[in-house]
Amino acid sequence: MPGNFIDVATVWLHAGKGGDGAVSFHREKFVASGGPDGGDGGRGGDILFAADDNLSTLLDFRYKRKYTAEAGGNGRGDRMKGADAPDLVIRVPRGTVLKQAETGLVIADISGDEPVTVARGGRGGWGNARFATPTRQTPRFAKPGLPGEELHVTLELKVIADVGLIGFPNVGKSTLISAISAARPKIANYHFTTLVPVLGVVRVDEEQSFVCADIPGLIEGAAEGVGLGHDFLRHVERCRLLLHLVDVSGSEGRDPREDFAKINTELKNFSPELAARPQIVLASKCDIATAEQIADFKAYIEGLGFEFYAVSAAAHIGTGALPGIVWRHLQKLPPVRTFAAQYTRPDPADAPRRPFTVTRLDAHTFDIDAPWLERILAGTDVEDYESLQYFQTQLGDSGILAELVAQGVEENDTILIGEYQFDYVF
């Protein structure tokens, strides 16, 4: 099962638009002036992400990049509300992290059992029945539905392996994973043979197995980007158990004690929590090491409190019992940790209800930037007196008219609101 340990995809999310409110008047035989009875529009569908343990990759998102929830139903006469749209549930492998594509900030971590709402659908518009007052008895306008949230999201899957193989290049990690699993990585006697992480499913028996990842590129200074760098350190972030291979023979002229210390220093520099992850130390290349070298290194490792085994994947020494040993350790460890999101989306309730800016473009032209006002204007019938009066009331209540006066607006000056243009009249 070779493949990239970090699986990434980018998608666009469009929550459903709210349904438009209806303009309707009651019609019934022998009933005069039934009055406005247009219903409200329905709510647009939300977009939720849910963990699915039957999925293990983000491959599906390579072929479909845009997800759009259904729009809410439009309101109808007799005060009938439009139907709320169903939510769109997108299923991803457990452990998928959602980030803002532009900033990289985390939106959600899909590791729990409950679906996570990522984009909310728009609210339905009001029907004309809501605008009836003693002085405005026949409103001929309604509010359009609000658009749903739109997000550009990067999906990153980091939970694939239970066990990570760490250690300096050329200590036998690729040979070991090929010996205990069906993975067939490139194996050669030089550094950085493995350029991408390789996964292997390790069978313990007919029913039990775990996933092991060969993590390349760890050398001194990796936490600062040396060698294959910082990126590969995050490959081990969510492995529950680390198998630390050390060349006990010293075949490349290095001291195994120093190798062990340097790799753990890199883990600690990257994440203290990662450095505290359970480790089993494997004395690799024991077939070409002396008994004294193995005994000395074993005493050192066990003195630090780590479990120690001497192995040689090339000579098939110690590899037969290794899957069972690892499996027993995994049964004692907690499940993959849920990462807390680094970013909390702002609550719309905390934002100004009706923000706007008024910009003077020249002596007699003013531009009003207010998306909420554009939505009201879209649902305004400028040929209908009451509808236009309602729009002007919103201008006054929001403070826009006062701001125009403060900036010196004059009779017949041009007012720009989105795609609309008006002449200012006192």
Image (cartoon, rainbow, N blue to C red):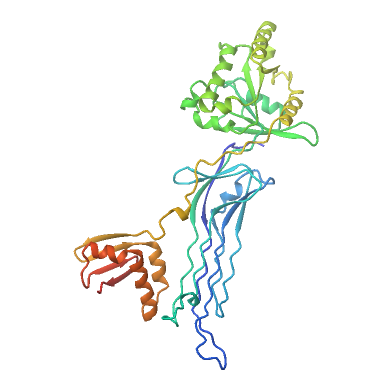
Q: Nearer the viewer, residue 211 or 267?
A: 267
Residue ranking furthest to the bottom: 30
Outermost residue toward the top in this view: 292
State which quadrant residue 98 falls in.
Answer: top right
**Residue drawn 37% across and 58% down?**
355
Task: Give x and y (percent) for residue 347.
Answer: 48, 52
Residue drawn at x 52%, y 80% as measured from the top left:
37
Spot occupied by residue 38 in the image (x, y as percentages of width and height): 52, 78
Say how many tags the image has.
Answer: 0
Is residue 246 toward the left or the right of residue 368 in the image?
A: right
Asked whether residue 251 is in view, the answer is no
**Image coords of residue 176 (percent x, y):** 67, 24
Residue 155 versus residue 133 in the image, above or below = above
Does residue 359 lie above or below 268 as drawn?
Answer: below
Q: In the rendered view, tell whether residue 79 sits above or below residue 313.
A: below
Image quadrant assignment for residue 356: bottom left
Q: Position of residue 185 (x, y in %)?
A: 63, 30
Q: Is residue 88 visible?
A: yes
Res. 111 image quadrant:
top right
Q: Residue furthest left?
A: 363
* Quarter of the picture holding the C terminus: bottom left
Quarter of the image for the N terminus: give it.
top right
Q: Nearer the viewer, residue 226 or 142?
A: 142
Task: Name the residue at the right extreme.
Answer: 206
User: Is 339 or 270 nearer to us in this picture?
Assistant: 339
Q: Residue at x 57, y 89 (%)?
A: 28
